Amino acid sequence: MNSRVPLLQIKDVYKKYGNDDKYALKGVSLDMYPGEIVSLLGVNGAGKTTLSSIVGTLRPPTKGDVLFQGTSIYNNIPEYRRNLGFCPQRPNLNPLLTLRQNLEFAGRYFGMTEDEISQRMHELEKSLGIRKYLDKNSPSLSGGWKQRYLIARTLMHRPKIVIFDEPTVALDPDVRNQLWNYIKELRDQGMSVLLTTHYLEEAEQLSDRVCVLDNGVVKLIDTPQNLMKSFAKERLEDVFLHLTKQQDGQEDE
Amino acid sequence: MNILNYSSIMGQLLLTDFILFKRVFWAKLIDLSIWAVTTVAVTGYLLPAFGIEAAYGSFMVAGVCASAGLFEVFPSIMNLVSDFEGDRIISFYSTLPMPTSFVFIRLFLNYSLSAIPLTLCIVPISKLVLWDKFDLSNMHLPKFLVAVVIANFLYGALTIWTASRVKGLETIGSVWMRFIYPMWFLGGFQFSWYVLYGFSPALAYINLLNPLTYVMEITRVSLLGQEGYMNYWICLAALIGFIVFFMWHGIKRLKRQLDFI
């Protein structure tokens, strides 16, 4: 039982797309606490990206609510967005602006002063090593570099909640490790991180808790250690495989 | 307080657009000038040799002014739909601390405002081409400026609305040929509404449903004088109505299509 006050509460969220009868999310509930990394795990189509896009205010839920510091985000979405950083899976930096302009304007959109922007740029340059290509445009960069700048843009305004949707897909192992360390630093700075990932090793390394989604339903939420202990497995990957096999077995029956 | 915050974000977004527009301004102006000079020169010098009234060149200057922004509509729709189906840069803007509708209002303002300086260049360029054949004595400058602004606001709104009707990139090619071109050509680019009325009142009344009719007429009134054209204030009111409708309906549809909040 966590005695802290949740920063974010996802309450019984359902999501249906258009006229589709099928629900992508079916009554998902999840609390997130300050300075916590929660990973969303699940096979393709489990509802991870749908859930992160709802928390990221990209999409509305069909039913249910999301509370930030005890108040529904839908009462004042702009105010909630001030506290939110959303890093999508696909780098969507403005290709016509330099990366420096992308970052500077991101700060300005969130009402930062020029001094604050300059200070934050220095911090991000240092921690993410992004100085090298600041005056280039994003199309000339590799996927790994684009991802770094995308993360920098997400963090410019010092959000309280950061959503990373598959942040390390297609990255080299060394870049991935650097990003993992950086995400841990964010937690240490008090940011809450919602991470969707396919990489179980990533979830095991980074997460305070993992939330396993299956077919739009929360199957399990616990710390990686507890999950490994309760399933008597040495790696989170084995727990996940065990769960998916169990699910396949149920579907076969 | 919120309004101040949103205005500040909108200001920064438009500043971003302005930086990008500055880079392409001269290229766009050259493109537009080639079209304007060709059209005005042919209609001002060549067609009168075929028996068309000598003042037809100045009449066409107004049509060219009224149409300048329209040529930005199709590429803007293309860019917008490509983004919806591609990197979705729009998703970043939809997570900024402002209501999601402002994302589309920003696009509308960007499309509208960037076409205004291009349109304003048409008059001096045309004057240089036609010189004494283009009489500016009937031009009402304040009315002309309002006409240019409102015309380009209509094109901005039309871009948003049309983008909301396009199913995808594979069908976008039809937008120009099936929708924009007939609307433009039948909207009085080469003739006034009263001329159409004299030819066929029924067609003229149907054409009142075409927003470009009012764009052409309001520009002509402000540039060439009221005589022979629809009332300036009626055109202005109609255009405001079209802009409000296109924006309201376009934003509603785009939000549903993109599943935005």
Image: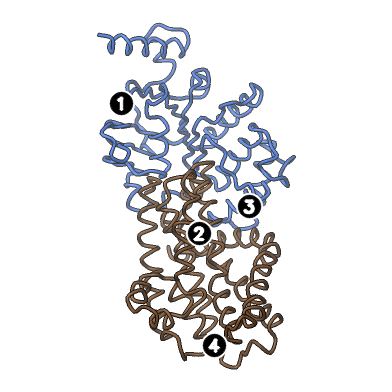
Position in image of residue B101 (x %, y %):
41, 57
- Position of A142 compared to A25: left or right? right
CB atoms of marks 1 and 4 within 8 Å: no
Observer-side mark, 2 or 1, equals 2
Say few, some or many: other residues with alpha carbon within 10 Å of mark 4 (under 14 / 14 to 19 / 20 or more).
many
Q: Which residue is mark 3?
A: A104
- Which residue occupies the foreground of this view, B114 or A176? B114
Residue at point 47%, 36% (across, down) = A192
Q: Chain of mark 3?
A: A
Provide the secondary structure element on which disc 1 rests: strand
Vertical relation: A211 (above or below) A162: above
Q: Which residue is mark 4?
A: B224
Q: Which chain is brown?
A: B
Q: What's the CA distance linking mark 2 and mark 1?
A: 37 Å
Q: Amino acid at mark 4?
A: Leu
Q: Chain of mark 2?
A: B
Q: Which chain is blue?
A: A
Q: What's the CA distance linking mark 3 and mark 1?
A: 39 Å
Q: Are labels 3 and 1 assigned to the same chain? A: yes
Q: Amino acid at mark 3?
A: Glu
Q: What's the CA distance linking mark 2 and mark 4?
A: 32 Å
Position in image of residue A35 (x %, y %):
47, 34
Outermost residue, bottom side: B137
Position in image of residue A6 (x %, y %):
36, 37
Say few, some or many: other residues with alpha carbon within 10 Å of mark 3 (under 14 / 14 to 19 / 20 or more).
some
- Which residue occupies the foreground of this view, B244 or A167? B244
- Position of A120 compared to B178: left or right? right
CB atoms of marks 4 and 3 within 8 Å: no
Q: What's the CA distance linking mark 4 and mark 3?
A: 47 Å
Q: Which residue is mark 1?
A: A217
Vertical relation: B238 (above or below) B104: below
